[in-house]
């Protein structure tokens, strides 16, 4: 079994990007891609949840924290044609399949600064294995609301391993429900994308 890497509360997006730009981390990551079938199954399940919610194949989709593009690949296999990627790590981007994505944003989402993506751009944001400590956190969800069209969807998974983080995230989502930014937050049980971990898949609809 491959060893998962933990991420701490004190990591900022710059140090996380340095981590993902580190050759050792990229090698570690490559092993998951090729050796762990669960990785692919976890990503495929996210793509299928997305398919069950997004009826139009031309819907504009953003793969958030796309890594090496495994989510985009699975989403494309389901017939979606209009997928963009956002990913800050140069090393990850080198492996991203260019034929899968129309536009690629090389940037990190920052909770206190808007990204370069215009308002109301996307029908759906999808993210696998990237909503976690020091990566994408509750504070980033206002930016998601900004770049989504009204009634747009956010679909992502969070492992049971990050249960403390998940509790804080759910509090942040509740606050966004209460201020009218989100219309609904639903979750379902699933496998994560490595190490036989269980996870929640969240489907969030903006107001
Ligand atoms: C565990 S990888 C998952 C990658 C991909 N979604 C997959 O399933 O293969 C986490 C990714 O999140 C990206 N990331 C971390 N913090 C980020 C941020 N603030 N904004 C955008 N991407 C971020 C990293 O560069 C890395 O590629």
Image (cartoon, rainbow, N blue to C red):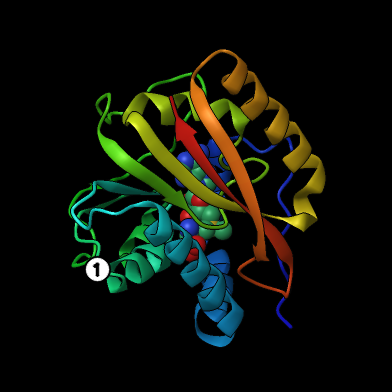
Image position, residue 47 (x, y; %): 43, 64
In the image, residue 194 above or below residue 160? below
Numbered disc total:
1
In the image, residue 77 above or below residue 11? below
Q: Secondary structure at mark 1?
A: loop
Q: Residue at x 65, y 65 (%)?
A: 190
In-image side of 60 versus 132 (left or right) = left
106 or 170, which is in the foreground? 170
Q: Which residue in the rendered view is the most extreme toward the right? A: 164
* Pointer 1 local density, CA inside 10 Å: few below 14, some 14–19, many at least 20: few
Quadrant into which the C terminus falls: top left
Q: Would residue 91 be seen by someone viewing this image from the given angle?
A: no
Image position, residue 120 (x, y; %): 27, 27
Q: Residue at x 20, y 54 (%)?
A: 82
Image position, residue 115 (x, y; %): 35, 28
In-image side of 56 versus 75 (left or right) = left
Image position, residue 8 (x, y; %): 74, 44
**Residue under label 1:** 79
Q: Residue at x 37, y 54 (%)?
A: 90
């Amino acid at each position: 079994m491959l060893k998962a890497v933990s991420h701490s509360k004190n990591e900022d997006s710059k140090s996380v990007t340095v981590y993902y730009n580190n050759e050792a981390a990229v090698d570690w990551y490559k092993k998951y891609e090729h050796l762990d079938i669960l990785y692919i199954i976890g990503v495929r399940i996210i793509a299928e949840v997305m398919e069950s919610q997004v009826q139009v194949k031309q819907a504009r989709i953003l793969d958030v924290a796309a890594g090496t593009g495994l989510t985009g690949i699975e989403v494309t296999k389901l017939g979606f044609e209009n997928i963009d990627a956002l990913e800050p790590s140069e090393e990850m981007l080198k492996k991203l399949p260019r034929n899968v994505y129309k536009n690629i944003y090389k940037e990190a989402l920052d909770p206190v600064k808007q990204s370069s993506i215009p308002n109301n751009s996307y029908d759906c944001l999808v993210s696998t294995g990237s909503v976690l400590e020091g990566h994408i956190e509750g504070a980033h969800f206002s930016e998601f609301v900004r770049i989504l069209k009204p009634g747009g969807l956010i679909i992502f998974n969070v492992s049971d391993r990050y249960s403390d983080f998940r509790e804080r995230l759910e509090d942040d989502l509740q606050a966004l429900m209460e201020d009218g930014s989100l219309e609904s937050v639903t979750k379902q049980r699933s496998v994560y994308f490595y190490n036989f971990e269980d996870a929640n898949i969240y489907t969030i609809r903006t107001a």
